[in-house]
Amino acid sequence: MALQSLQITAITAMRARDVSRPTPEQQEAADQRPLRDETPRREPRRGRDRDTRQAQG
């Protein structure tokens, strides 16, 4: 309920926009990566992997 009284000022909005903007290097790296829809789906893990992880933990 405390968030209902939160007021976003113009300065806060501008700071948030600047912080969320990627650097040119980050943007270039993202452009080189394939989109999520373009990547092949991974095979689901088998039960054997799950059993060994539980035994180790």
Image (spheres, helix red, strand yellow):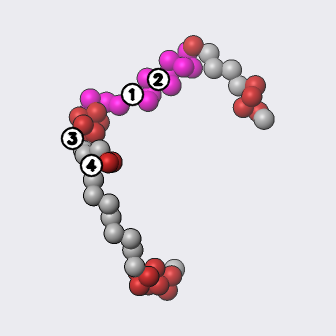
Mark 1 or 4, closer to the camera: 4
Distance from Cα at disc 1 to Cα at disc 2: 6 Å
Name the residue: 33% across, 48% down: 36
Distance from Cα at disc 3 to Cα at disc 1: 18 Å
Nearest the viewer among 10 and 38 is 38
Distance from Cα at disc 2 to Cα at disc 4: 29 Å
Would residue 43 be found to the left or right of residue 28 on screen? right
Query: Which numbered dot is residue 21?
Result: 1
Label 4 crowd bin: few (<14), some (14–19), many (20+), radius 10 Å: few
Q: Which residues are magenta?
A: 11-25
Label 2 crowd bin: few (<14), some (14–19), many (20+), radius 10 Å: few
Query: Which numbered dot is residue 32?
Result: 3
Residue type at numbered disc 3: Gln
Mark 2 and mark 4 residues within 8 Å of each other at the beta carbon: no
Query: Which numbered dot is residue 17?
Result: 2
User: Does the magenta segment cover residue 1?
Assistant: no
Query: Which numbered dot is residue 38?
Result: 4
